[in-house]
Amino acid sequence: MKSFGNVLDDSNGLGRGFDFMRIALSLAVVTRHVISLAGPSAAGANPGADIGFGFGLDWIFSYSILIMFFGLSGFLISGSAMRLTLKNFLINRGLRIFPALAVEVILSAMVLGPIFTTLPLSEYFTDHKLFLYFTNLLGFVYYFLPGVFNGEWVNGSIWTVPYEMGCYAIISVLIYYQLLRKRWLVVGISVAIGIVEIALALIDFKGQQLTLHSPVEMIRLAPQYITYYIFYARGSRLLISFTVGIAFYLFRYQIPYSKLLFAGAVAAVLVAEYIGGWTSEESPTANVFIVVPVIYITIFLGLTNIPLLSILRRGDYSYGIYLYGWPLTQATRMVFPEQTKSWPFLLVVSLVPILLFAAFSWHFIERPILQMRKKFSFVARQRLAEMESETPPAEPRVPEPGQNPLA
């Protein structure tokens, strides 16, 4: 029976379905956000903390999307992490993530904001919220622009940026101390994270009300806040998914590529959800039972030759879809306030500008950056060669290890 590593080798180190997975997951995130933003329930609120999908398959679909993203990132990023020095790894990641993010933040603040603000432009451009919004470039997430979208979040997708930076910090330590070849150590890190999450759930850590009234309290309660957001809040599933994804890569020659195991993983997820009865995004115990089978499903599909529409093979649009999905959905709601109370209508209408801006991001920002990244990236060199030959690829192109659209 072939292993994940064997299948990866057969395709020259490039999984055949990873492009499909990235596009599918990006569109799934957009759909998830559209449902949370549509209708009167979104008005006057800050959507995103709880998308309200409800029970059963709705919940597991919502909960698993980011597990799949971060697990896929951990799996793919490990290849470049084992090949590059820490300096080159960080340069490669920075060139992939930050230019497109910077353009999105600037366009939101300087174009979208002035169009949709209810304030006079003189007040808008002097309001402190405008300047705070640029802290998103440094990983300090701030959701608001003055007078924009009735005080709702301008881009709720960026809440994952600090977690992604945390993932890069983890793998940077592993690179620096040459620990990536210590496979069981990575497994141990994943297990340790899971144990902490279960322990916090058992003591109902969520019930500890953390309030800040002064800088002194901010310093005093910092350990509790950090613990809460890493191991208990809705982001608790992200770091453990990333480390499990790394472990999958390190054990790729020992993990069978099996349709039977794939079916078993799907069944395991459904059974775990049924028994656990989880309904909230703050469900750290769910991570322990769901992350491993969900990531098996993700990598299996990524190594499977899944057809991708030819128009979507002209570029890697997934990151742009992720970046522009939320703000353009919000903009669509403002333009069609009554019609977009129906989420299918909001989804269809929003997808047009989202895909256009995703194409803009790829062709005018991300693609030119490939030239700068080709020194560090095997896949960047492959894509540049395809572009120069102007020959369409025979099958979906695959992202360079570590390309993650939650940046």
Image (tube, rainbow, N blue to C red):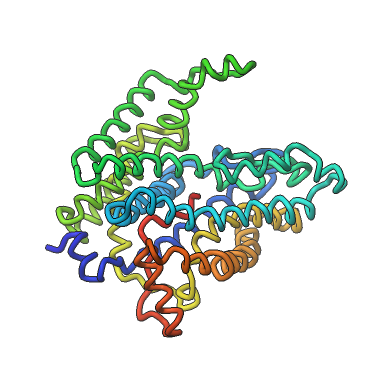
Question: Can residue 363 be seen in this snapshot?
Answer: yes
Residue at position x 43%, y 32% in the image? 230
**Horizontal and vertical percent position of residue 37:** 63, 48
Image quarter (top left, top right, bottom left or bottom right) of the N terminus? bottom left
Left/right placement of residue 19 relative to residue 33 reads: left
Q: Position of residue 341 (x, y in %)?
A: 68, 52
Q: Is residue 298 left or right of residue 116?
A: left
- Seen from the viewer's position, the closer of residues 401 and 82 is 82
User: For the image shown, how many numbered marks are present on the structure?
Assistant: 0
Vertical placement of 73 versus 318: above or below? above
- Residue at figure coordinates x 51%, y 68% from the top left: 367
Answer whether residue 298 is visible to the viewer in this image. Answer: no
The residue at 19%/44% (across/down) is 183
**Residue at point 33% right, 23% down?**
199
**Residue nearest the viewer, comparing 343 with 379:** 379
User: Residue 62, relative to residue 373: is it above or below?
Assistant: above
Q: Position of residue 96 (x, y in %)?
A: 47, 58
In x, y percent, where is residue 177?
Answer: 27, 40
